[in-house]
Image (spheres, rainbow, N blue to C red):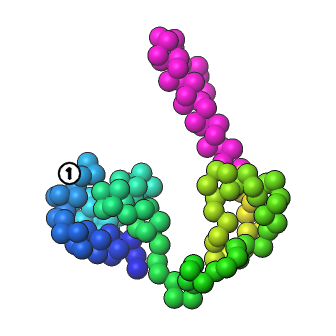
Amino acid sequence: MALGTKLRSLRTERGLSLRELGRATHLSHSFIADIEAGRCSASIDTMKALAKALGVDLIDLLDEPRPDFDPATVSSPPVKVDPNNPRVKRLAEVGIFLHTPFELDEQDIKEIEDFIEYRRQKAAKRREREEQRKKGDSPMPG
């Protein structure tokens, strides 16, 4: 099911009009209608706001049912990496769940680690700018 179709289904199941969902998310009702119709895409932040207003997890808004995969029947992680590997443990600590219906190879792990490091650096810079703003200093370039 496409995002727009899923969004419309969740909205109507909850008895919400486009305007009501718009007010709850601080998005215009016409923008939401465009997403539902597939005329435009939504950013992650927009999807998070929509998921929150609809009372679902972001993954529920995005995830399509997979008849070939039932998480309840999985007795062990299908990920074929060593769960004792420190790199894998680090991924689990930051919320990368290892119970996925696909394999993670070393390249996947490296890409995830690189992304996590990038986001940590961005967050550190943002915190630094906020601290400088609180102190009244001008932010450092970069």
Compared with 18, 132 (above or below) is: above
Whether the magenta-drawn stretch holds residue 140 is answered as yes
Compared with 26, 15 (above or below) is: below
Please, what secondary structure does the residue beneath circle 1 have? helix
Question: What residue appears at the point 40 percent right and 67 percent down from the top-left corner?
Answer: 61
* Amino acid, disc 1: Arg
Drawn side of residue 25 relative to residue 110, left or right: left
Q: Can the viewer see residue 74?
A: yes
- Stretch in magenta: 114-142
Q: Quadrant of residue 142?
A: top right
Q: Position of residue 134 (x, y in %)?
A: 47, 16
Q: Residue furthest top?
A: 136
**Mark 1 crowdedness (10 Å alpha carbons): few <14, some 14-19, many ≥20:** few
Q: Position of residue 30 (x, y in %)?
A: 21, 60
Whether the magenta-drawn stretch holds residue 76 is answered as no
Q: Residue furthest bottom?
A: 68
Q: Position of residue 85 (x, y in %)?
A: 83, 58
Question: What residue appears at the point 24 percent right and 74 percent down from the top-left corner?
Answer: 13
Q: Report the quarter where the N terminus lies.
A: bottom left
Q: Position of residue 132 (x, y in %)?
A: 53, 17
Q: Quadrant of residue 127?
A: top right
Drawn side of residue 85 relative to residue 1, left or right: right
Question: What residue appears at the point 43 percent right and 69 percent down from the top-left corner?
Answer: 60
Q: How many marks?
A: 1
Q: Which residue is mark 1?
A: 23
Drawn side of residue 60 relative to residue 73, left or right: left
Q: Can the viewer see residue 37?
A: no
Question: What residue appears at the point 50 percent right and 12 percent down from the top-left corner?
Answer: 135
Q: For the stretch drawn in magenta, what is the main secondary structure?
A: helix
Compared with 70, 15 (above or below) is: above
In-front residue for pair 18/54: 54
